[in-house]
Image (cartoon, helix red, strand yellow):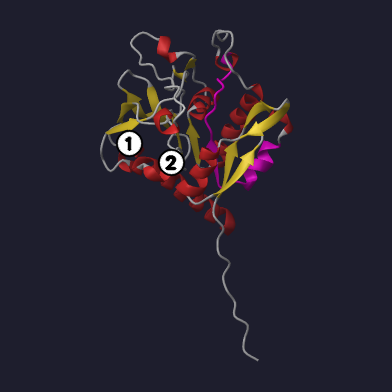
Amino acid sequence: MAPRRVTSPVPRPPLIGVTACIRTVDGSRTHTVGEKYIRGVTDGLGGLPFLIPALGDDLDIGSVVGCLDGLLITGSLSNVEPHLYGGDPSVPGTLHDPARDATVMPLMITALTAGIPLLAICRGHQELNVALGGTLHQRVHEQPGRLDHRAPGATDLDIEYGPSHPVTLTEGGLFQQLNGGERRLTVNSLHWQAIDRLADGLDVEAVADDGTIEAVRVTRTESFAASVQWHPEFKVRENPFSLALFGAFGEAARAYAGTRRRT
């Protein structure tokens, strides 16, 4: 009898947590994630997306984080509740999502403490700053000297998520490396809120010409942990910088997964 052939197991793709928002759909409370974020994981880094419901205190965050190789914090139409950073009450009609706030804030802190790679986008960029002790402008377009960073309001997504304004990347920073050494990059823009006071433990990676902080990197972890104000997940494979950003995130997630398997 021929000896049985023994093959090594093929490592699975990294499991990437993707945060959800609360929406009311046909009268029902629903946990939702835009497909572009899921495609960012599958197409941008070859990962397995794992959707995380916005259950707040009813979610066992420690158990969730213990399963993950990376964490993607999504954007959203809603704004971070201002009481979380000592801000004034929102203008009437502002969309909020307290269940998401109650989920994502502790989720990010737990993930960073565990050294899990993290990428945060738009609202996630703002949440990261608040979670680490920073503050926000609620309506950055009303600040003196600032650009109007809000979405164009177009029905054509290629226009809605199209190039909007340039940013300058920090000399010698991670993003400059990902951009092939170039310090200028053109990004899309679909936000009302923006970072005001930068939290301790964050370094600026990109700034718009009006001074708006467009990207940061977490300094308190040795793993990949960064956030951007724009939306690199939209058609991620068609934008070289977006692909490089998701690629770096994916590389870190694979390294983290390998470390977990060895231990």
Mark 1 vs 2, N-terminal side: 1
Element at label 2:
loop
Give left or right: position of 101 versus 182.
right
- 119 displayed left or right of 102: left
| Extreme-front residue of the structure | 155
Instruction: Name, please, the residue furthest toward the bottom.
Output: 1
Image quadrant in which you'd find residue 17: top right
Q: Residue at x 66, y 42 (%)?
A: 64
Which residue is found at the position 42% from the left and 9% from the top?
Answer: 142
Q: Residues within 10 Å of mark 2 (few under 14, many from 20)?
A: some
Which amino acid is tagged 1? Answer: Gly
- Tell me which residue sits at (62%, 22%) in the image: 97
The image position of residue 13, as x and y in percent, is: 54, 55
The residue indicated by pointer 2 is 235
Quadrant holding the N terminus: bottom right
Q: Determine the image quadrant of residue 229.
A: top left
Residue 129 covered by magenta stretch? no
- The dot on residue 173 is 1
